Amino acid sequence: MSRLVCVSNRISLPRKSAAPGGLAVGILSALKRTGGLWFGWGGETIEQEPGEPDVHIREGVTYATIDLKKDEFELYYNGYANEVLWPLFHYFQRSMRYAPEQRDAYESVNRTFAQKLAPLITPDDVIWVHDYHLIPLGRRLRELGVRRPLGFFLHIPFPNIEMLRVLPAYAELLRDLTSYDVVGFQTENDLHSFHSGIEQLCGPEALRADGRIRVGDRTIRAEVFPIGIDVASVQSEALEASQAEVVKRMTDSLMGRALMIGVDRLDYSKGLVERFQAYQQFLEAYPDNLGRITYLQIAPLSRSDVRAYVEIRQALEQAAGRTNGRFADTDWTPIRYLNRNFPHATLMGLLRAANVGIVTPLRDGMNLVAKEYVAAQSAEDPGVLILSNLAGAARELSAALQVNPYDTRSVSHAIQAALSMSLQERRERHTAMLQVLKRNDIAAWTRRFVEALEQAHPPENARVRLVNQ
Ligand code: ADQ
């Protein structure tokens, strides 16, 4: 059995109050199952060159963290990763702000990651690199002589070649992806988009009939591995947290009103402005609901140094203020809008308490909150999930009430349909979705990816660099 080495931009050491994003939730639950090493940036930026990794062992998982140089980090993370790749990959071409220095920093940080990680790799390791911050890392590790299997998983969407071509260095990005042995995507759409890029770069003959990709004298696997959740753990967290003080206080404060909940990082891709609009249209179109429903939107701030995130934050504060100003009563606030984190278990308890879960991203790789909402429900009296058909999760969760997030009027009708849905229909939809979630849970996701890595044939001619050599 190989040792699993996961690499991601940011590591979150397990802390009770911490609220990791989707990627960290996925990696942590994968590593807790298999043990192994998690390597990445620890959250500190420094003036000088980064030193050796800090290593901690907790609950069978080894965490190795490095610092990054302050000036480079800004250009690499806020710049190239979050002002170039993130918007482009989510089809927000107009939010992209490209500058060549950002790309230089991106390359340089990936080189640093490779230099610090390579000495920690042992001959038993399989290496699983996560997400768009680290696309060049595989090539850099190969250059340093690492010849263990290398896999890459993209948590966000992959754009079609016509969108990808907007990126000045798109060919290098595709080439870097092909330096891995296994490349994983969330959905068939993302895989097709990747194929469209490979076809342009290497010609149609590179796409083999068995789904593998021929690159020079190597064959790589590019496949769909939709990320799942730990269903049993979400269920027990949700059940337990529903008795917790904070959840009880919230449900008491509803005074018998219905609850609709949204939980998203504050990000323009999550469709919050459109969602607030849809809710306002719902209150206008169905005035019987005035005073009878509370919409709780939890949206912790993220990437606050990036301009687009400052703008979206202002737009949301105004939209929530407008709706509340117009419709609130002395004893009722239509939207409760919170920019704060909660422990994961508390969040699951809040999801369970909600009659409607609203998840309407304008584009999303998968969206774990949609899956968590379904798993957190009580089977006897489940709530209804309203889900954007532009989220990766829409493929698997076909029994959700699916909406186009831009069509705010349809979303407003979906809210009404969710609130008035019969118990029988709610149960049928919930049972169907829960089955899908159990079949493809987080354990299945990890197992499938690691198996693919173990079967991979890394190039023979790379030199191996072992621990302490
Ligand atoms: P994210 O964009 O971060 O993930 P998502 O998939 O919804 O989005 O995951 C968020 C995770 O963080 C969930 O597990 C959620 O419970 C947790 N979380 C969110 N807000 C929280 C809060 N206030 N307090 C505590 N926990 C909170 C990226 C991609 C997604 C993809 C995931 C995983 O953008 O499309 O599904 O990675 O691959």
Image (cartoon, rainbow, N blue to C red):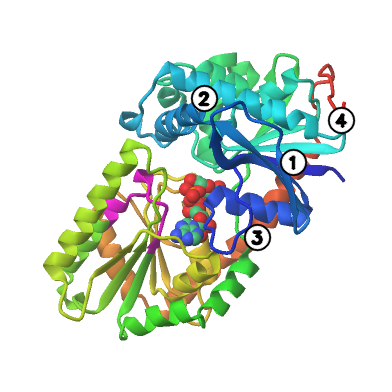
- Asked if residue 271 lies in the magenta stretch, the reply is yes
* SS category of the residue bearing label 1: strand
Q: Is residue 33 left or right of residue 205?
A: right
Amino acid type at image mark 1: Val
Q: Quadrant of residue 464?
A: top right
Highlighted range, magenta: 262-275
Pick whichever of labels 4 and 1 is earlier in the sequence: 1
Pick out the residue farthest to the left.
Answer: 326
Question: Amino acid type of disc 4?
Answer: Asn
Residue at the spot of label 1:
5
Disc 1 and disc 3: Cα gap in Å? 25 Å
Question: Which residue in the protein does label 2 denote?
Answer: 196
Of labels 2 and 3, earlier in sequence is 2
Q: Horizontally, is 154 left or right of 352 in the view?
A: right
Which residue in the structure is indicated by mark 3? 439
The residue positioned 84% from the left and 43% from the top of the image is 2
Secondary structure under badge 4? loop
Tell me the distance, in whole angstroms, between the alpha carbons under discs 4 and 3: 42 Å
Residue 95 place in picture, x, y as percent: 32, 32
| Figure quadrant of the C terminus | top right
Q: Nearer the viewer, residue 244 or 462?
A: 244
Q: Residues within 10 Å of mark 4 (few under 14, many from 20)?
A: few
Q: Earlier in the sequence, mark 4 or mark 3?
A: 3
Whether ligand 1 has any atom under 8 Å from the Cβ at mark 4 is answered as: no
Kindly report which numbered mark, 4 or 1, lies closer to the viewer in this rendering: 4
Residue at the outermost front position: 48
Q: Residue 15 falls in which quadrant of the image?
A: bottom right
Which type of secondary structure does the marked residue at label 3 adopt? Answer: helix
Quadrant in which residue 304 is drawn: top left
Q: Label 4 to label 1, Cα distance in Å?
A: 17 Å
Label 4 vs label 2: CA separation?
A: 42 Å
Q: Which residue is mark 4?
A: 468
